[in-house]
Amino acid sequence: MIKVNVEQMIIDCGFDSTEAEIVRNCFKGKKTESIKELRKSKPKIIEIIYDHNGRKYRKSEFVTGMSAYTWRMLAFYTSGSHPHCCMPIMADFDLPYSMHDEDYKDTRKAQIAKCETIIDKILANIPKTEWKGVARWANVL
């Protein structure tokens, strides 16, 4: 898994406080160390339970849902681990939107765009030689 100085990357990329929290959730390491490693598994998602027409549903809390999506895409692009090499076609299921909201499609698209902006900034700080997932799929795509 990739290793980066997360706090320095947050400063260099100009992430706001919410984006910084999303990025921090994607990496793991000792608090005393500046270099952190991309998590080996998806960050824990806090779920929000809500009512709709008398039934209970759940959706992800904003930061943890966005972190899970961001982590999955980063793992796909950079991880050399076999469990992360499949296409992340269901990664958006972790995003914090409710299918019962009238504008849920627009909300989902906006959340994906926000995550993709974060992902692009992170990848810009990682040497392309570390993009193991991209290299693995290069001949297919």
Image (cartoon, rainbow, N blue to C red):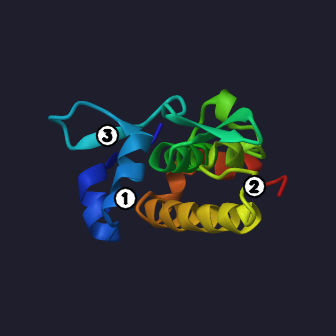
Q: Position of residue 128 (x, y in %)?
A: 53, 59
Q: Tell me if label 2 and label 3 are in contact, CB under 8 Å.
A: no
- Closer to the chain start, of discs 2 and 3, is 3
Which of labels 1 and 3 is toward the front? 1
Q: CA distance from mark 2 to mark 3?
A: 27 Å
Find disc 1 in the rendering and name its residue: 18
Task: Identify which residue is drawn at 51% across, 44% down.
Answer: 61
Indicate the secondary structure of the residue bearing disc 1.
helix
Q: Quadrant of the C terminus?
A: bottom right
Indicate the secondary structure of the residue bearing disc 3.
strand
Amino acid type assigned to the residue bearing label 2 in the image: Ala
Q: CA distance from mark 1 to mark 3?
A: 19 Å
> Does 10 appear above or below 64?
below
Task: Identify which residue is drawn at 66% across, 64% down.
Answer: 107
Q: Position of residue 21 (x, y in %)?
A: 35, 51
Find disc 2 in the rendering and name its residue: 138
Q: Position of residue 114 (x, y in %)?
A: 55, 66
- Closer to the chain start, of discs 2 and 1, is 1
